Image: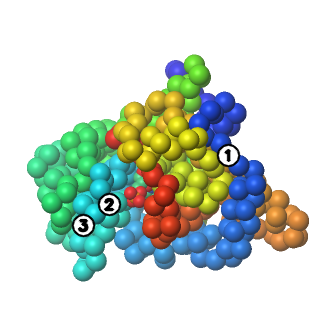
Amino acid sequence: MECFLMPKESGKFITDRSKDVLVLEEGVRKVAEMLYGKINSKEFDPTGWKSLHELNPQVMNEDSINWVFVADTLNFSFWSESEEHKCLVKYKGKMHSGYWSLCAAINRALDEGIPITSASYYSTMTLDQLKHVLRSDTDIPMPLIEERHRVLKEAGHILLEKFDGSFLNCVNESGKSAQKLLQLVVENFPSYKDVATFEDKKIAFYKRAQILVADIWGLLEGKGDGSFNDIGSLTMFADYRIPQALVSLGAMKYSEELMKKLKHGVLFQSGERLEVEIRGCSIWCVELIRDYMLHLGAQKGDTIENLNAVLIDYYLWDYAREHRKDMANIPIHRVRCIFY
Ligand SMILES: Nc1nc2c(c(CN[C@H]3C=C[C@H](O)[C@@H]3O)cn2[C@@H]2O[C@H](COP(=O)(O)O)[C@@H](O)[C@H]2O)c(=O)[nH]1
């Protein structure tokens, strides 16, 4: 069995050797202070996963757990060549883009009587059936539709073979450990194995596997089957939005060289040095933000209930969505892959 550095250790290892991405201590402290002011808001409470996001399932049951599994199996690569022409999905009168276009499409399918969250259905659906489910309300389709079809069928077959067709059975095998559930996911579902090599070291980001565990925790509000005693051991999810937010907020800095490539819309390859530095430094940057927020809490004598990289990540991701225009001067890094 190959052994990989886990995401947190990968983040540190990469940050210590990174050449084109810097984590800025001063900026980390500034962001930590900004977030600390929100510590008692809904955004920093597990119930926010449902209450702040109408497209997320609102009922804590097995169907919702299987909804989360399908959404996170397809939770990758929504960015479009041009911000003006992109895939949009209309649901209940509202247009949704990016990750939310996927959620809107899943809910639209369910409303149309298509059992898209049932493994016995999606493990055998045709490419045309998936194209219909994920159809865009503009002339730009959702990216990587063929890859989505492949990974969805694969995940469905495995869920039927190994977990009797329900992700709840996988959750129950985890014994309420986030790390155990993470291992079960990356060992059983190949498309979740988000790993790379950096300076001859095998490193793991496990972005979709970690967000899958976190979304189950959020759906279940950290209670019952979702009361993971080690949820704090998960790191932020190394996607293409959080790095943009961290640089925009001054907690991270890109070299001139890298900024030039980003501004030219260069397509990066999954696993290439610059892309690994962006993802690894983002993980470590959020770890430091969390640590400094805990330091602030100790300094002020506050008792902080829920503070972990998951909630910081969710906050920053939603923040990046709401401040898209303010962040326009920091391009996202463009990669086409099934990992994020
Ligand atoms: N780090 C991190 N990455 C996240 C998410 C989410 C969705 N989570 C929501 C659901 C419940 C929570 O409360 C969150 O509100 C999607 N992504 C990634 O972003 C990219 C899509 O971006 P855009 O093109 O702008 O939609 C793509 O790589 C996708 O994999 C997150 O939370 N954290």
Instruction: Answer with mark 2 or mark 1, whichever residue precedes in sequence.
Output: 1
Up the image or down, 251 lies above or below 88; here it is above
Q: Is residue 322 left or right of residue 286?
A: left
- Residue at the spot of label 1: 23
Q: CA distance from mark 1 to mark 3?
A: 36 Å
- Residue 287, label in figure: none
- Residue 83, label in figure: 2
Q: CA distance from mark 2 to mark 3?
A: 15 Å
Near mark 3 (Cα within 10 A), the count class, few <14, some 14-19 or many ≥20, is many
Q: CA distance from mark 2 to mark 1?
A: 28 Å
Q: Residue 240, image x and y in percent?
A: 46, 50
The residue depicted at 35 percent of the width and 48 percent of the height is 77
Q: Residue 215, image x and y in percent?
A: 49, 58
- Quadrant containing ligand 1 reads bottom left
Ligand 1 within 8 Å, label 1 CB: no
Residue 30: quarter of image: bottom right
Instruction: Answer with mark 1 or mark 3, whichever residue precedes in sequence.
Output: 1
Q: How many marks?
A: 3
